[in-house]
Image (spheres, rainbow, N blue to C red):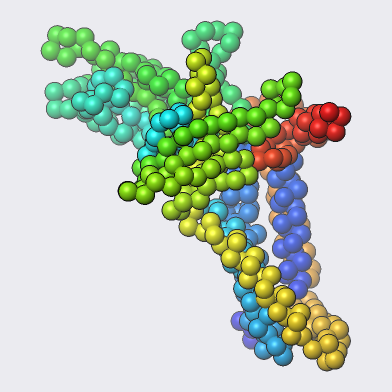
Amino acid sequence: MNLYRRIFRFFASMNFTLVILLAAFALVLVGTLMQIRFGIYQVQQNVFYAWYGGGLVLGLFILNLVCSLIRHVPEIRRPLGLILGHFGLVILLLGGFSDLFSRYFVLGVWEGQSADRIFHSDRWELFITDAQVGEEDAIEQVLAEFGLSGLGRIALQPGRLDPSGPAYDFRVEDAWGNAIPDPASPGTLVPEDWADSSSGNLPLLRLVGSLDGGREFPVEVWAGDAAGARIPVTRSGVLENIIIGLRPKEEALPFVIRLDSFRAEFYPDTDIPESFVSRVTIIDGENLLPRTIAMNRPLRYRGHVFYQNSYQFDQRGNAASVFSVQTSGGASLPYIGTAMSLIGFILHYLTRNPRRGSGRRSGKVLQSDANEAGGAAAPMAIIAAAMFMFMVFAWIHPTSLAAQDPGIAAPLPGEVLSEMAVQSAGRIMPAASFGELLLYELSG
């Protein structure tokens, strides 16, 4: 048996399938425990969405399914049902794989108003302007665009806003993915642990800059300050300000969404939301399409998926609805894959021939898999153990995931369980909060 044939049968074998399942189990287990220590967003980006984590496991699973299908189809008398079912599983996994390349945005709309732009939840722009933020006649330049996972790689180039303006030159001294005002010291910002979602993080950059090659000065730029940091300059004998700030990168929608009404319902005598519903109108050219967005009922339109995320009320009682927006070309793949698998396996069950001793034949196929793997059980076990130990190592050492505060002591077992993330009714909450809510529903 030549080398290429052995490699193909290795990837098509049942032993390799079991190794992938063990790796997927270890990935989910360790990733879930890591969320307690590092937060949901950090673990999503560095474990589940990383190529060496969820991407690798999904890719190997797809490879195993395709190789197994190619190898065993000629041995099956009526293969149509199995072919359709296995291709459905491949499409289902491709849908999960495409989610690794999805983009996530945030959209907030006040009741009665419309919006045609969405904002990246984890992509930011560092900009410099010669006027107030938002003025139409302002001269503006983007110094850098970065993601929260690339804070240590921000490179700034020197430049000049206009021919008559001063030349500027900035560099990043420190960067944090999230920061909050210090309650004990007004006007001071302190680094904060990562939020559970990317949209809850407000990055902080501490820069050192100079104008016209003069003396260097520090500049602190925080995403929570919409006005930006002011740098005083003198132009033609007049004192002016150059403003440098941070803002989420925005993207235009191919349509307009209008929030017609918003309704929030709460559990009796509590401030715990039971459900909230947004009634919107999609304005696409001359088409007016009324739609409803609610918890567990997202809106899908032209490659965009709108999830009901949160809400806000002002002092006058006016409501604003906040949506999480996902763009992905593979949003329909899980539905197609599930339908194909269901139809395929039902068809295989209805057309199979029970008189041909399928049990003995299946046993021979499994034994053939074990033999033709070429004694690869030990190497595959080593691969699975290595992947598991890598994830355990990442969990034990905070620096491997760039934890915001490596000095935090490891939580006790009871604290671990109480802070474990649980998804319920379209929301993610700690297990302790879920327990309180469940107890309230049971007791009334």
Q: Please, is residue 336 above or below residue 199 in the view?
A: below
Q: Position of residue 50 (x, y in %)?
A: 58, 50
**Does any portion of residue 146 appear in the rendered image?**
no
Q: Quadrant of the N terminus?
A: bottom right
Residue 244 occupies which quadrant of the picture?
A: top left
Give the number of marks.
0
Q: Is residue 146 left or right of residue 362?
A: left
Q: Please, is residue 370 above or below residue 412 in the view?
A: below
Q: Which of these two is toward me, 128 or 168?
A: 128
Q: Position of residue 135 (x, y in %)?
A: 26, 23
Q: Is residue 42 left or right of residue 355?
A: left
Q: Position of residue 409 (x, y in %)?
A: 74, 26
Q: Please, is residue 25 above or below residue 324 in the view?
A: below
Residue name at image x 65 percent, y 83 percent: 80
Residue 336 occupies which quadrant of the picture?
A: bottom right
Residue name at image x 43 percent, y 30 percent: 112
Q: Position of residue 23 (x, y in %)?
A: 73, 58
Q: Which of these two is toward me, 172 or 23?
A: 23
Q: Quadrant of the C terminus?
A: top right
Q: Please, is residue 69 above or below residue 110 in the view?
A: below
Q: Which of these two is toward me, 326 or 414?
A: 326
Residue name at image x 67 percent, y 73 percent: 343
Residue name at image x 69 percent, y 22 percent: 271
**Does any portion of residue 394 appear in the rendered image?**
yes
